[in-house]
Image (cartoon, rainbow, N blue to C red):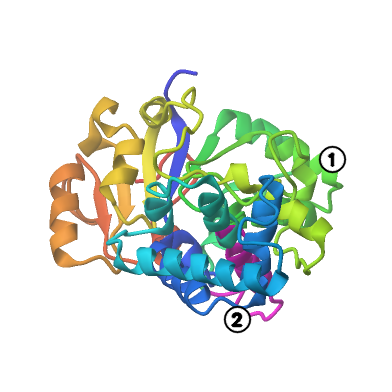
C-alpha cells in the first residue's frame, strides 16, 4: 500500500492501559515479586503443574509436602533473583531466565495477573473500568473513527482510512472495547462485527494473553476477556496453551512484521502512553524510519524532565498553537486530553 494522508498509526505503551486499572511495566514486576515472595498454594500448584507438563512429575521426590516445600523454595529463589536483578520489566527479567519451566512459570504468572486486571476492567461502574463514561480515551477514539457512519459505509470508510495499532501491552483492552463497541453501537451480530474488525490492524509486539473467543484459536489458546478460572486441571490447561503467545525481549517475534515499514506508510504516528524505553524503541526499527521529526506525535504526561529532553532531541518538539509546525508535537497532556482536543480522523489531524 502506498502512503496515504489517511493512514493512521497508534503505538501504545503501558500508559494506554493504565487508565483502565492496568499496571505499568514496573508495577507489574513489583506485583509479581510480591506474589512469588509469599507464594501461596495457588502459585505452588501452578509451578508443580508446569513441571508435570514438561514431563518432570516429581523432581523433588515423591512426598507431596516435600515437593510443595521445594517448589516454594524454587519460587522464592526466582523472587529474590527478580528483586536483585536490576530489570526494568518482567519480560526484561524473563529474557535472562534460561530454565524453560521457570520461564513458563513467569509467563503464566503474567497471564493470570493480567487476566485478573481484565476482569476488574469489566466493572459496570460508570466511573471506572474499560467502558467508563468519563476520562476514557477509547470512547473518544471510537467516536472519532467508528461512529456517525451508516453501517454499510463504515467498512468502505476503514478501507479508505487505514487505522493501525502497534501495542506493547499484553492485555486485550483495545480489541474488546472496539469489538463490543461495534456490536452494541450498530446492533451487529458477532459475524458482522468481525467483518468490520478485519479492516483494523492490531499487532502485539510482546504477544497477548490469548485470542478472544470471537477471534478463534488459529494462533494459540483462547481466553475470554477477564475470564475467571478456577483451580481445575482443565482450567490450567487453558492458560498453559496460551503461554507461547507471550514473548519476552530476546524471543523470536514474527520477523516478517517490519515495524519500520508500517511506520513509513503512515502519514502520522500517534505514540500514546509510551515510556520510550530503548529496547522498545529498537524494536520499532526507528533507524529505518524516514523523517522521524516530521512524523511522530506523542504524549509525555508523567515522564521525567530529563527523559522528555532526550525524547525531544530525537523526535522533535513543537506545541499546538505555534506559528510553524514542521515536526513532531510533544503533548504535556494525558491521553484522554490529547484524543479529545487534538486527534481527528478526517485526514486533517495535526
The segment highlighted magenta reads: 110-134
Q: Quadrant of residue 185?
A: bottom right
Does the magenta-highlighted stretch encompass residue 119?
Answer: yes
- Outermost residue on the top side: it is 2
Location of residue 192 with respect to 329 vertically, above or below: above
Is 152 covered by the magenta stretch? no
Sooner in the amino-acid sequence: mark 2 or mark 1 = 2
Task: Describe the element under mark 2 as helix, strand or loop.
Answer: loop
Taking 109 as reference, is 261 left or right?
Answer: left
Residue 158: x, y in percent? 62, 35
* Residue reaching furthest to the right: 189
- The residues bearing labels 2 and 1 have C-alpha atoms spaced at a distance of 30 Å
From the viewer's perspective, tell me whether residue 50 is left or right of residue 313.
right
**Residue 8 place in picture, x, y as percent:** 46, 38
Of residue 212 and residue 38, the one placed in the foreground of this image is 38
Q: What residue lies at 40% left-to-right and 46% top-to-bottom?
A: 95
Crowdedness near tag 2: few (<14), some (14–19) or many (≥20) residues, C-alpha within 10 Å: few
Q: Residue at x 37, y 48 (%)?
A: 96
Residue at x-position 38% and y-position 69%: 80
- Circle 2 sits on which residue? 127
SS at badge 1: helix
Total number of numbered discs in the rendering: 2
Residue 299: x %, y % from top left: 32, 58
Q: Which mark is residue 265?
A: none
Q: Is residue 23 visible?
A: no
Residue under label 1, please give it: 191
Residue 275, given in percent of the width and then of the height, sits at: 32, 56
Camera sees residue 161: yes
Nearest the viewer among 261 and 341 is 261
Q: Circle 1: is it few (<14), some (14-19), or many (20+) Cα within 10 Å?
A: few
User: Is the Cβ of the residue at disc 2 closer than 8 Å to that at disc 1?
Assistant: no
Query: Going 35% across and 37% down the picture, which residue do you hit?
Result: 283
Amino acid at each position: 500500500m502506498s502512503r496515504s494522508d489517511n493512514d493512521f498509526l497508534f503505538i501504545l505503551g503501558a500508559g494506554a492501559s493504565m487508565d483502565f486499572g492496568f499496571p505499568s511495566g514496573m508495577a507489574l514486576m513489583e506485583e509479581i515479586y510480591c506474589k512469588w515472595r509469599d507464594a501461596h498454594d495457588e502459585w505452588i500448584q501452578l509451578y508443580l503443574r508446569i513441571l508435570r507438563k514438561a514431563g518432570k512429575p516429581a523432581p523433588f521426590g515423591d512426598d507431596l509436602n516435600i515437593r510443595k516445600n521445594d517448589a516454594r523454595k524454587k519460587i522464592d529463589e526466582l523472587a529474590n533473583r527478580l528483586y536483585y536483578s536490576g530489570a526494568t520489566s518482567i519480560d526484561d527479567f524473563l529474557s535472562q531466565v534460561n530454565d524453560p519451566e521457570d520461564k513458563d512459570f513467569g509467563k503464566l504468572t503474567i497471564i493470570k495477573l493480567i487476566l485478573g486486571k481484565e476482569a476488574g476492567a469489566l466493572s459496570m461502574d460508570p466511573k471506572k473500568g474499560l467502558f467508563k463514561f468519563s476520562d476514557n480515551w477509547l470512547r473518544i477514539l471510537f467516536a472519532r473513527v467508528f461512529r456517525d457512519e451508516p453501517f454499510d459505509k463504515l467498512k468502505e470508510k476503514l478501507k479508505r482510512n487505514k487505522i493501525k495499532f502497534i501495542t506493547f501491552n499484553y492485555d486485550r483492552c483495545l480489541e474488546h472495547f472496539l469489538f463490543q463497541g461495534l456490536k452494541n453501537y450498530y446492533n451487529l451480530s458477532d459475524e458482522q462485527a468481525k467483518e468490520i474488525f478485519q479492516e483494523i490492524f492490531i499487532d502485539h509486539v510482546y504477544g497477548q494473553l490469548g485470542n478472544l473467543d470471537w477471534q478463534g484459536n488459529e494462533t494459540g489458546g483462547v481466553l475470554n476477556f477477564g475470564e475467571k478460572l478456577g483451580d481445575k486441571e482443565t482450567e490450567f490447561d487453558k492458560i498453559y496453551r496460551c503461554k507461547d503467545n507471550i514473548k519476552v525481549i530476546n524471543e523470536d517475534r514474527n520477523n516478517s512484521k517490519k515495524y519500520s515499514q508500517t511506520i513509513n506508510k503512515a502519514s502520522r504516528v500517534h505514540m500514546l502512553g509510551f515510556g520510550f524505553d530503548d529496547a522498545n524503541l529498537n524494536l520499532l526499527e526507528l533507524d529505518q524510519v524516514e523523517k522521524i521529526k516530521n512524523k511522530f506525535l506523542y504524549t509525555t504526561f508523567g515522564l521525567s524532565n530529563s527523559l522528555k529532553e532526550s525524547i525531544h532531541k530525537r523526535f522533535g518538539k513543537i506545541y499546538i498553537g505555534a506559528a510553524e509546525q514542521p515536526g513532531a508535537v510533544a503533548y504535556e497532556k494525558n491521553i484522554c486530553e490529547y484524543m479529545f482536543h487534538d486527534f481527528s480522523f478526517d485526514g486533517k489531524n495535526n
